[in-house]
Every structure is written in structure tokens, then in C-alpha cells.
Image (cartoon, rainbow, N blue to C red):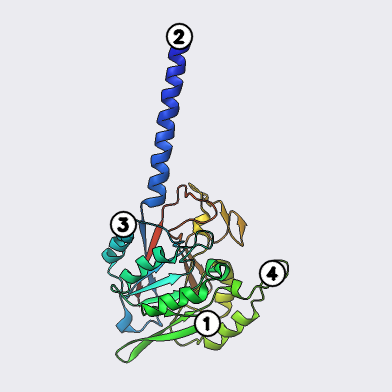
Amino acid sequence: MKVIKNRKRAVIITLVLLIGSCLFLYYENNSIVISKYSYTNEKIPSSFKNLKILQISDFHNAQFGKNQSLVVKKIKQCEPDIIVITGDLIDRRRYDLEKSMDLVKQIVDIAPVYYVSGNHEAWSGHYDEIKKALLSENVKVLDNDSVDIQKGEDSITLIGVKDPDFLTSNYIEGTDYSELEKYLESVSKDNDFEILLSHRPELMWLYKKCKVDLVFTGHVHGGQIRLPFVGGIIGPDQGFFPKYDSGEFVEEDTTMILSRGLGNSVFPFRIFNRPELVLVELGK
């Protein structure tokens, strides 16, 4: 009888742990957090003070409620002036453009949307289709391109770079960043306030070399699994315990905001790493 009772107790404890783990994983992967930052720079024109920029990154055609209602509700609550998407809107392994466009079609009614590609767009083989769909919804696609955002007589420059994997011939040779470097050097101007959209945080060396003021990046998913007081476990193109995993990084005159993103890719779960929207408010 004692053996039977112990077995029952073990089964109950196991079930409780399994149910608790499932609930924890569901919460960690579906409960969106909004991370807010204030950014100041003397180069920001006074008319752009309090401009709110909302960043979406690494969506990977995720699903947040029916018709993406949960994430759209969060975005509306932020009342952004512009929305930027920093790559991996889709997932190349589970390609489903419709899910991602369900989100895009709604957020274009909230604020102007600017987009740059990520490595999953580069690998998908569907980039022409993705770009065409985005342009049809009046999303500004910045493939090594820039645009001036005007407020009266004042303006700031928004620069976007195509993901470096569009330039990669194979993994052995690696990526030639010279084209990207030439482009950034040609558009970056010391006297103007510039915001850069790029998927890749590991290129911080290039962003600060080109003296970009503010950079929005993604790609790392926050390290996928985060340890309290330690940070992310692994980051693509950075390896274990990546230097750039999540948050704000300041090097010389360049500030980089790195989003943990919303979706998942190779590893299907986030642990201690909730999906994230980023909201940055400009100051002077």
C-alpha cells in the first residue's frame, strides 16, 4: 500500500510539474511586453521632440490571437508616430506570408510603416513576393535606401539596409560587407540626425564607424533562452553568451536598440524571454 501511495504521489507531482511547465511556456511565448526607451540627442530638431517610434522585429509569421488582434491591440496602446520593422517578418521554414500580412494590413492604419529585410527573407526564395505585398499596403521598403521624414521645415533621415545575407555566396567565403559599408558611408552625414534600420546587431562596429546616431536591430531573439542576471544564452552570428542580446547599447556616438522580437524560428520556445515590442521616444 505504501508503494502504491508513493507512486500516486509521484504521478501527481509529475502531472503538476508538466501542467505548470506548459502554462509557463505558453505565457513566456504569448504574453507580449512593451519595452520603453527615451533617447536624447542635440541633433534632433525641436519639432521631432516626443516623436514615438515603435519597433517590430523577428515576427516569423507568428500568431497572436485571431487576426493578430493581441499584438495589434498592444501597438495601438503605444500610439506610435511611426512603425519600423527590422527584418524576419516571415520564417523561411514555415513560410506563411498571409499571417504576417494580417499584421501589416492593420498597422498601416495606425502609423506610417518602414521595413528592412532579415536573413529569413534572404533565405526564403520569396523576397520578390514579400516586397510586392508590402508595397501594395504602402509600406516603405528600404533596401539600401533612405527617406527624409518632414515636420514643417525640419527633417530627420531614416536609413534602411538590406540584410547582408542577400550578399552571401556561401558560408565558407562569408559575407562581404564592403558594399554595405560603402552605402552607409555615402548616406551618413555628421550634421543631420539619422536613424538606421538594420536586422544585424553584430555589425555595431560598422554603425559606429559610419557615425549613425540611432540604430534599430533584431535577429538575436534575446538569446532565445535568458538566464536571470546573465542574459541570452546564444545568438546567431555571435555564438554563446552574445555581447549584443537585448536592450540598449551605446558605443562612441552611436546608440543601438536591440529588440528581442516576437516570434520563434529554429528553437520553438522562449524561456525567461517574453515576446517584445519596443517603443522609443525622441527627446532633445
The residue under the point 42% across, 75% down is 133
Residue assigned mark 1: 144
- The picture quadrant where one finds residue 277 is bottom left
Mark 1 → mark 3, Cα distance in angstroms: 34 Å
Q: Nearer the viewer, residue 172 or 155?
A: 172
Left or right, residue 3 beside residue 20: right
Between tags 3 and 2, which lies in front?
A: 3
Residue kind at label 2, given as amino acid type: Lys
Q: Are marks 1 and 2 in contact (CB under 8 Å)?
A: no
Residue kind at label 1, given as amino acid type: Asn
Between tags 4 and 3, which lies in front?
A: 3
Classify mark 3: residues with Cα within 10 Å, few (<14), some (14-19) or many (20+).
few
Residue 15's place in the image compared with 103, above or below, is: above
Q: Nearer the viewer, residue 137 or 73?
A: 137
Residue kind at label 4, given as amino acid type: Asn
Q: Secondary structure at mark 4?
A: loop
- Label 3 vs 2, first from the N-terminus: 2
Residue assigned mark 2: 2
Q: Position of residue 274 (x, y in %)?
A: 41, 52
Residue 234's place in the image compared with 20, above or below, is: below
Classify mark 2: residues with Cα within 10 Å, few (<14), some (14-19) or many (20+).
few
Residue assigned mark 3: 66
- Label 1 vs 3, first from the N-terminus: 3
